[in-house]
Image: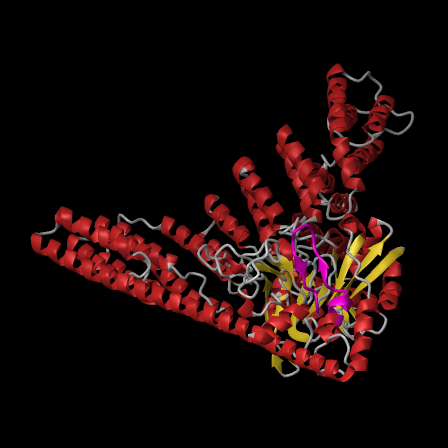
Amino acid sequence: KLSINAFDYNCHLDLIKLLRQEGELVKLRRARQKMSELFPLTEEIWLDWLKDEIKMASESSEREEVYELFERAVKDYICPEIWLEYAQYSIGGIGQEGGIEKVRSIFERALTAVGLHVTKGTALWEAYREFENAILETAQPAPGSVPSPEQQQMLCSQLEKIHTLFRRQLGIPLLDMEASYAEYEEWSEDPIPEPIIKNYKKALQQLEKCKPYEEALLGAETPKLAEYQAYIDFEMKAGDPARIQLIYERALAENCLVPDLWARYNQYLDRQLRVKELVLSAHDRAVRNCPWTVGLWIRYLLAMERHRVDHGMISEMFEKALNAGFIQATDYVEIWQAYLDYLRRRVDFTQDSSKELEELRSAFARAVEYLKQEVEERFSESGDPSCTIMQNWARVEARLCNNMQKARELWDNIMTKGNAKYANMWLEYYNLERAHGDTQHCRKALHRAVQCTSDYPEHVCEVLLTLERIEGTLEDWDAAVQKTENRLARVNEQRAKAAEKEAALAKQEEEKAEQRKQARAEKKASKKAKKTRAGDKRKADDDDEGEWGQEEEEQPSKRHKGDGDGVLLEEDMEVETGLFGRSGPEKPALPANQKEKASTSRRDIPKVLHDSSKDSVTVFVSNLSYSMADPEGKLKELFESCGEVVEIRPVFSNKGTFRGYCYVEFKEEKSALQALGLDRKVVEGRPMFVSPCVDKNKNPDFKVFRYSTTLEKHKLFISGLPFSCTKEELEDVCKAHGNVKDIRLVTNRAGKPKGLAYVEYENEAQASQAVLKMDGLTVKEHVIKVAISNPPLRKLPDKPEAGRASQFAVPRQIYGARGKGRTQLSMMPRALQRQSNPGAKAENGMVQNSPATSSGAPEEPKKMSNADFAKMLLKK
């Protein structure tokens, strides 16, 4: 696996673990070495490696190799345990020449690095004092002997070293510093000086201020980013550079894959400390931990230039950045621009030619080619559509090299890349010519701009006329006026044609909508005519009351809706908290006895209105199978795991068929919240949708889409998958590139796969590597496409035009939370909708002063039944 992807962090760990279990020490050392070259290693990995090497080191040459390994370890992260292990290991070489001084040097470096660590610094101070006490014991004269002056001087010097260590430690806020103070009192023969006591009390006060932040870190769960940020802000206000550096290092040890944290730390070092070794080390660790973040590479190049690093090393670092695997095409444009800026600052433009200038020009040419070849091949775009790099190149040639001929060639190339239609590009070129060229080329550029610009031609025409007004002759002015007038006339003509075409398309859409509406009305009219003929036939056979009269008495779904709202015809409709379903497909006419049974079944189905006051304890369940035999029993069994279910209200049509959605009411609100976790659970082969019960009339912006619609750098979007690909098969492919946290196969409402998937990794690094390795991979003879998840923005619905027919401008409240369904179209035939005067209305069965009833001229509106409508239709 590592031969395929050398940047697979987890694969390195697995290999090291396996080799350590097998005892393959040589291969183990090689595996660790290779991993350390690619990644900074964690404290645990370094300690295991160091302990293994210490066991094998016996000769002095091998001890030197261990020392070198310790030096590498302490550079990756500031870890108290590694420094303590380093110091204790160095004590073993005390017998060698200069051994004592070497141990002291390591202890001093350790105290500088982590001696201020509030919780772990005490161990280092105590280890250092124990070492000096051991030296003191060996310097004591034999019992009964008188020490020589040299011995006496050495004893005094050693005692002073221990006194100094105690005093330095007591001036630093560390945990258990009271015990250290008591130990010093007991050890010292003389009283503790007043300045030392004063520093100790000051450190105690500072410790009390730090304790809340340390306790927050102890109680928080990994990665503790918010707690560390609060601690950093506290130390920044205090302003102690050493303490600020230490808390940043502590935070980065646990959040090494957070680019923003590295960026803030490096910015602090660049602006405040400005110590070359410290700054460059931090930048190097940042790009090794987060190589996919272009901003860190740019900061590193700037820091290297700021500290006057050799040009070869900067160029080498830039090449590493190009191979880092950025996740966006624009990232490559940014890193190239930063490197070109650096090269431009190296050039002495007072000379006509120089090595640095040639290097800059070749770098510009290479950048343009790189974006065209490498980046465009990978991302299907260059990342630089407006050719900013070529624009900067042209500016350098024109302003700094006085080479307008080269600048014009570059701008000509820019315009051939699809930028000639933009006015701002022509004006940018014009300004360059105006500053460093001549009037002839300015005029030529503006004439071309007038001819080519399509977005803002008026602006370009105005600039041309302004030029000729100031500098042109009469002939130039006449030519410019004629050219601009002709161009603007053509533009206006094109715009008028486009507007006419758009209006024609809109009219066609309106006509099609009108035709569809008329066809539906005629279909309904013919259906009712058939029912009328069937009713007349039964009347002739039975010599009884007409069918229409019976239906007028038996229709349970026809009811008054509110005060003065008229009659809402609800035949073939269901009512449930304002949600209206679509009518099902038409079925052939049933025999009379079956029709009576269906009518009875429609009457027996209760229509229970939803109580909006119980929305908090209710969930809305949809996308269920219409063929579900016992939805109430099935769903009760499913949702009882979330809490006590008070009621399940499945929604049925008037024909008694289940409509695929229902309401589940719980006793407690927490049960309803827990039920939302069942969203997308497969029930009888379909994903069940579970959403909060929310009235969208009151909350129009409410959305129940559960997944993020923004850029997620740790998540991949995969397309082109075979429909037969399972979640387990996809996981086997993806886990080779990192730890997979979640996989979601996208399906349609029926639960059928769409060949799409979202794969979530633990961090951005793993996701970026997975993109590099998986994009274009073949899975079951299908070539898949892999990219970082960044869903496109949803387009908002167009607002209706103000002048459109008002017959559709019905308040949303009439239709309910899910808008207007097909069954809510007016049940009145079109012939009856013609009104004798503009003020007359016909709404949902309420007819006022219609032509069919105007002869009687009733003062009060007459409420009409389906039978009345049918009789009126037959008279037409």
The answer to whether residue 240 shows anywhere in this view is no
Does residue 77 appear in the picture of this structure? yes
User: Left or right: where does residue 585 sit relative to residue 57?
Assistant: left
Left or right relative to 392: residue 793: right
**On-image quarter of the C terminus:** bottom right
* Percent coordinates x, y for residue 379 in the rendering: 50, 67
Which of the pair 757/117 is nearer the observer? 757
Residue at x-position 50% and y-position 59%: 798
- In front: 204, or 750? 750
Q: Position of residue 757 (x, y in %)?
A: 66, 69
Measuring from the top left, give residue 253's x and y in whole percent.
Answer: 70, 47
Q: Is residue 732 above or below residue 768?
A: below
Quarter-wise, where is residue 724 in the image? bottom right
**Picture quarter with the N terminus:** bottom right
Image height check: is 140 above or below 522? above
Tally of numbered tags: 0
Q: Left or right: where does residue 803 sit relative to residue 27?
A: left
The coloring applied to the image is secondary structure
Q: Find the residue positioned furthest to the right.
A: 144
Most foreground residue, 125 or 285: 285
Q: Which residues are magenta?
A: 550-571
| Residue 501 occupies quadrant | bottom left
**x and y, in percent, of residue 3 in the image:** 65, 73
Q: Relative to residue 699, is residue 193 drawn left or right?
A: right
Is residue 556 one of those drawn in magenta?
yes
Q: Residue furthest left?
A: 474
The verdict on residue 669 being magenta is no
